[in-house]
Image: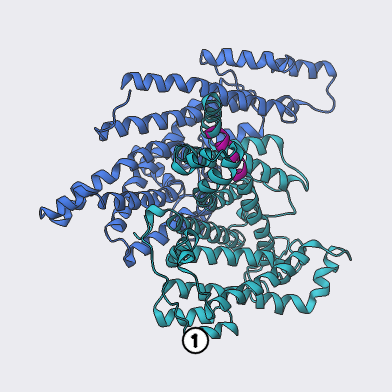
Chain colours: A blue, B cyan
Amino acid sequence: MARYILRKLLLAIPLIIGVVTIIFFLVELSPGNVADKFFTPDMTPDVRALIVHKYGLDQPMMVRYLLMLKNLATFDFGVSMVQERPVFDVIMQALPNTLLLSTVTLIVIFPTGILLGTLQGVRQGSVSDTGISLTSLFFYSMPSFWLALMLQLLFTLHWHILPTSGLHDTVMYDFMSPTQKLVDRAEHLILPGIAMGLASAAGTARYMRSSLLEVIRQDYIRTARAKGLPERTVIGKHAVRNALLPIITLMGLSLPFLFSGSVLIEYIFAWPGMGRLIVNAIFSQDTPLIIGCFFVFTLVVVAGNLLADIAYAMVDPRIQYD
Amino acid sequence: MTAIVKNREVQAPQVTRVGLVVPGLGHLLAGLADRAGGAIITGVGLLSLDAALLWAAVSGFPRLHDVLFSASGGRLAIHPIIALIAWLVTLIAVWWASYRRAFPRQLTDAEFNSNTQVSLRQFYRSQTGMLGLYGALFLVVMALLAPLIAPFEPNMVSLTPKETPPSWLYLMGTDHFGRDLFSRVLYGGRISLSIGFVAVGIAATIGTSVGALAAFGGGWVDRGLMWFVDLLLSLPRLVLLLAITGLFRLKGAESLFLLIAILGLTGWMGVARIVRSQMLSFKEQDFVQAARALGFSDVRILFRHLIPNALSPVIVYCSLAIGSTMLTEAGLSFLGLGVSPPTSTWGSIINDGRDLLINAPWIATFPGLCIVAAVMSFNLLGDGLRDALDPKLRGS
């Protein structure tokens, strides 16, 4: 197992180098660069040259590319051009917020999805099955950003129950007691969490249903029924447990999905996380920050895949790596 | 193996002849009589298409001259002509469907048990699949007929009715420029749907080629291509697209084509994987061995034997991918990175409505509902096609 993980991690290195290379040349080939933002019409050429030199943009492209790779090898992400702070610090400030949002979403969507999918699978073809199927497909087909807007419209603008956006209350937060702070943060989590998780929960329900239907057809389920076990035990102990195996893989794979979904959600809810960071970095052509963000996103993909593999091996004794 | 089924005498109740007068009514009545869900959904679907045709005729034909000429400053415009052709084609199609129902063609036993016919029957039996098919057809037809149906010019700025709520005159209300939202949504649907179709078409073509090349080339070609596929798959697609469109800022009239190309170029990896794995499993099968034994060339085996057999999962994948591509496009347009104004898509109309959520919530609501309807239709269609095309799932 340890050897398998090590091999996977080693294989991730060329992957990350490839991703970083693609992004670097994408930024390089795009028109304009970060220095343009600091130019004013009345600048002398000397000052312009100074600015260009400050960001190292006067060096040839290949030199900068190799320099970047060398720095990345020592986990030196450089300094954000716009924020003038180390990229590592900027990312470390944003990452926990996105992780919080994704984790809370994950914790809510999986039980919901599994429960709904089981209900459907047990009564295949019934009215409730079709009803849940169509409802979950409805949410599955919904653009998350539109759902976010509709939630804001209903819960904040119409009913005034929940806060519109942000991590916590901007004005009152500092004056709150710890309990109030916790409640306030939780309230701010609800809408982005729903907007981000509803589609995934619907997707999980779909997977769970088909997985359960596949398991129910197996011989060991027939055996369990034939030996007179009550249906509850057959479903609960034999069918659902085995049907959960592919869902566990899905859990690891949905982490990167949630991360990229966070781009739109964080933009709408002004959530200071990775999604908003990468959008701002792209808009200001802040090369080190863009590359740092993509590094993290790729790392999340690799970690998600690895987690899925490990979790799968842990729950299914038939799986043996290497 | 599907059991060989004897071709039953197809019952043609007299009632289906009604369909020759009102296409769809025959299906509906026969379906109600037989309690056959597929026929009922077909009937309702055809009736909805009838309604769209009638609407276009009533609203568009009296002002046909205006629609054809004046909108584009006296020149004959291309969109209304496409709309007219689409109107005729749809009319013929709905009548043909009703004619076939009233006078079914007698199939020989061999035809009856052919793969196509079995799949078609299976698909007809899946009610959700039919629902998706007719939902998608209805939206596509509405979008194609937009110049005939739309009561106003989509970009016509008018000063009097600003941000009016939905009414009989303005079915979906107007926006902050006084533009009729219903017309904008109809025209936006043309762009949104065609982005979905064309981008997925490009993706399917590239994906099939790469997958076939990897499976056929083997060795280091296979390893190299699949490594590249893995590389692209480990970049979250939305974020990659955001980087491309955000850095290059598509502008002007070409922005639509560039966006379609970019969506196509970032969406082919799934198809490549499917085609490759399909072909690897076919390569050792008897029919390919037989073709080889007959001395057919590699090219012929590839195009006549391997690709057609690998196509059905690709079709299913594409149907589902149209939905997800439309969602991605809507997300980009929502961030203001999609097609540049005044051309609008459903996503960019939602973006327009975002700032007016308090005063004019209808601007963001209606295009969103359209996206949901379209994506849901394509997802239902894809699910239905998967059940119908996959022999393993048949009869379950």
Work out whether residue B287 can be spotted. Answer: yes
Work out whether residue B270 can be spotted. Answer: no
> How many discs mark residues in the rendered view?
1
| As drawn, B386 above or below A305 | below
Q: Residue, x 49% and y 86% (percent of image)?
A: B15
Q: Position of residue A27 (x, y in %)?
A: 67, 28
Report the chain holding disc 1.
Answer: B
Q: Residues within 10 Å of mark 1 (few under 14, many from 20)?
A: some
Q: Position of residue A130 (x, y in %)?
A: 37, 63
Q: Residue, x 47% and y 58% (percent of image)?
A: B115
- Determine which quarter of the picture holds residue A135: bottom left
| As drawn, A39 above or below A194 | above
Q: Is residue B205 magenta?
A: yes
Identify residue for label 1: B15
Q: Disc 1 residue type?
A: Val
Q: Position of residue B67 (x, y in %)?
A: 80, 70
Q: Is residue B39 magenta?
A: no
Residue B232 relative to residue B247: left or right: left
Magenta span of residues: B203-215
In the rendered view of the protein, which quadrant contains the N terminus of chain B?
bottom left
In the rendered view of the protein, which quadrant contains the C terminus of chain B?
bottom left
Query: Which is more toward the observer, B218 or A222?
Result: B218
